[in-house]
């Protein structure tokens, strides 16, 4: 070994060591869904602090500022980062408030659907027999109904409103919870600790709440997180069709529908709200998958 | 499965299963139509629609008698259902002609669109699914998985609009919408078929991976069969059962998808009819569309169950 090479050795080793730590750090980060989590965080923060985050009023526009392109394009202005729509409203601000709508709907529907579905799932699993039969047939029923069509009929009669959207979506979102929770509850029912509780004289209610419920919580969380994406999409589709959130509330689906007629001149009106939906759904699907793999890998077939 | 089980109870099990599914499908159909009916009655006396300055009191009462409005609500529902089953769905409020005619006109457009979307989904999903399973970790695999991932997250209406923006408005390759020649089918078919293609791709990929790992494929390889034979003759055929039953479910996805896609592309089919009649407050037409589509939906669901039960006997036990 020449002197020269010997002198170079430690440096090279140090370099390799550095390289390895970088790789290790990357690998560690890779185990967590960093980018989806970041997207999700940005959206949630934007939604919660909408009045502070949004640069403009989402409903008020001035006709002098209509159809201004995003700021990096020719004719764009720095005060309207993502441009404005045909009546001069700031698109970024509307997207920020739109995040609020999506978030509120997802949380409400998941809370209602998750609670009802979990309760019915546990009841079906624990009591079995007729209760099980009735609840599971109800699940089959809600799965076999063409949801969009029922939504259209409901809206024609009752008109568009936030309450109708939430109710409709809640009615058709408990089924997945009930089905998975029931399967889980059937397994827990046969465990020794439930048998012991029964022998000790615990009531059915107590066993369901104190012994079965804690055992199905992971499943509930996984089902809920896997559902978020499709709930956001469903709400967006309803709003796009004019059967969801009424105008002028800035729901993302409504914004895309508004921008449809201006594709030739101002593509950004339809583009950015749709992009927001896409990113949020993608992020929540990623996070849902990750959470499932962490908490309950057996649910893999749930998609 | 116990092979020693006698044949008769097994066949009986299948029949029992089918009867059960049939009943539950009938219940769905009845409840959905009942729901539509109750809502349509809740929105007012159906006679007011036909009321004009020439209407006499006798006419008014005759209508009431004809439609059984003097009878209990349940009877009214049965009368309505009976008429609907015979193809009498009332008149459109907008166009003042029979709903059945309005619906009939729209069926071909939807069916053609569905076929186009199906071709796209199968044409993209099947080969790419196989490729990404066979060349695992390659560029094909990554692009396949990306498509599968995006397929689930892309809002269908936005996809349609972006396709119009790029390929119709800017590149001017395809028309922006409406029905017409073969070029009119491209963008709507992609929009409607995208989600299905993604689902199919995932299914084909995972079942191909499973099959490629099996003993008989290993045996075929050991025997010295060529890569082509192994993949297409041994693996592909066996990997196809799961996706086959999925393609039956595709129809159900198309139903919802058609409503969105037809709205985006101004496609004169049933889905768009449903949306326009909603915004026109034309309840008879909307109920008619729901009636027809729910019937189809329920029927296809039932046929899918049947197919499943025949292909995979384990389902019957569920």
Image (cartoon, rainbow, N blue to C red):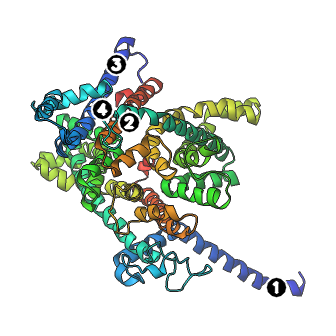
Front residue (pair B231, A227): A227
Q: Is residue A225 left or right of residue A155?
A: right
- Upstream in the sequence, badge 3 or badge 2? 3
Q: Which mark is residue B89?
A: 4
Q: Which residue is mark 2?
A: B293
- Point out the frontmost of discs 3 and 2: 2
Q: Which residue is mark 3?
A: B15
Please report, as a chain letter, where disc 4 is located: B
- Point out the frontmost of discs 3 and 1: 3
Does residue A33 appear in this view? no
Mark-to-mark CA distance, 3 and 2? 26 Å
In the rendered image, residues at marks 4 and 1 fall on the same chain: no
Q: Give percent across and percent down for residue B22.
A: 31, 26
Q: Is residue A297 left or right of residue A207?
A: right
In the rendered image, residues at marks 3 and 1 fall on the same chain: no
Mark-to-mark CA distance, 1 and 2? 76 Å
Q: Is residue A273 left or right of residue B122?
A: left
Q: Which mark is residue A8?
A: 1
Q: Give percent across and percent down for residue B313.
A: 43, 25
Please report, as a chain letter, where disc 1 is located: A
Mark-to-mark CA distance, 4 and 1? 89 Å
Please report, as a chain letter, where disc 2 is located: B
């Amino acid at each position: 070994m020449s002197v020269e090479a010997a002198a170079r050795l430690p440096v090279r080793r140090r370099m390799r060591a550095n390289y390895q730590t970088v790789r290790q750090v990357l690998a560690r980060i890779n185990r967590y869904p960093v980018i989806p989590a970041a997207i999700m965080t940005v959206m949630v923060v934007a939604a919660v602090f909408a009045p502070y985050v949004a640069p403009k009023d989402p409903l008020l526009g001035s006709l002098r500022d209509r159809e201004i392109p995003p700021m990096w394009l020719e004719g764009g202005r720095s005060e309207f980062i993502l441009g404005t729509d045909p009546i001069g409203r700031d698109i970024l601000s509307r997207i920020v408030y739109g995040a609020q709508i999506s978030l509120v709907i997802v949380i409400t529907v998941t809370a209602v659907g998750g609670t009802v579905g979990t309760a019915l799932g546990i009841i079906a699993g624990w009591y079995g027999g007729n209760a099980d039969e009735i609840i599971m047939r109800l699940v089959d029923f809600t799965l076999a109904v063409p949801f969009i069509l029922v939504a259209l009929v409901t809206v024609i009669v009752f008109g568009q409103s936030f309450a109708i959207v939430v109710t409709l979506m809640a009615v058709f979102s408990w089924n997945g919870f009930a089905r998975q929770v029931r399967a889980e509850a059937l397994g827990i029912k046969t465990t020794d600790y439930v048998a012991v509780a029964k022998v000790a004289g615990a009531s059915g209610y107590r066993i369901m709440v104190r012994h079965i419920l804690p055992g199905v919580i992971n499943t509930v969380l996984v089902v809920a997180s896997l559902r978020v994406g499709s709930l956001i999409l469903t709400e967006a589709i309803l709003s796009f069709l004019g059967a969801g959130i009424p105008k002028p509330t800035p729901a993302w689906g409504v914004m895309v529908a508004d921008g449809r007629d201006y594709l030739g001149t101002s593509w950004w009106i339809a583009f950015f709200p749709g992009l927001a939906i896409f990113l949020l759904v993608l992020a929540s699907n990623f996070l849902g998958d990750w959470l499932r793999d962490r908490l309950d890998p057996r649910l893999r077939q749930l998609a | 499965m116990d092979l020693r089980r006698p044949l008769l109870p097994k066949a009986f099990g299948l029949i029992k299963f089918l009867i059960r599914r049939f009943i539950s499908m009938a219940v769905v159909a009845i409840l959905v139509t009942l729901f539509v009916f109750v809502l349509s009655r809740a929105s007012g006396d159906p006679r007011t629609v036909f009321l004009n300055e020439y209407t006499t009191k006798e006419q008014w009462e005759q209508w009431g008698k004809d439609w059984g409005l003097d009878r209990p609500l349940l009877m009214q529902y049965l009368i309505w259902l009976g008429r609907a089953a015979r193809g009498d769905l009332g008149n459109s409020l907008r166009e003042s002609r029979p709903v059945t005619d309005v619906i009939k006109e729209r069926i071909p457009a939807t069916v053609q669109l569905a076929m186009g979307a199906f071709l796209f989904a199968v044409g993209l999903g099947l080969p790419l699914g196989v490729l990404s399973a066979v060349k695992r970790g390659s560029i094909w695999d990554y692009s396949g998985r990306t498509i599968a991932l995006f397929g689930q997250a892309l809002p269908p209406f936005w996809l349609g609009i972006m396709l119009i923006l790029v390929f119709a408005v800017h590149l001017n390759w395809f028309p922006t919408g409406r029905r017409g020649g073969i070029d009119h089918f491209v963008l709507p078919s992609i929009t409607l078929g995208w989600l299905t293609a993604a689902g199919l791709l995932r299914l084909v990929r995972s079942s191909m991976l499973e099959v490629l790992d099996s003993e008989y494929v290993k045996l075929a390889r050991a025997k010295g069969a060529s890569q082509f034979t192994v993949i297409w003759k041994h693996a592909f055929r066996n990997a196809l059962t799961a996706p086959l039953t999925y393609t039956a479910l595709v129809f159900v996805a198309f139903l919802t998808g058609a409503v969105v896609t037809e709205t985006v592309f101004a496609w004169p089919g049933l889905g768009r009819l449903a949306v326009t009649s909603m915004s026109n407050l034309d309840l008879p037409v909307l109920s008619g569309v729901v009636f027809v589509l729910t019937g189809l939906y329920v029927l296809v669901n039932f046929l899918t169950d049947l197919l499943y039960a025949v292909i995979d006997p384990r389902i019957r036990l569920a």
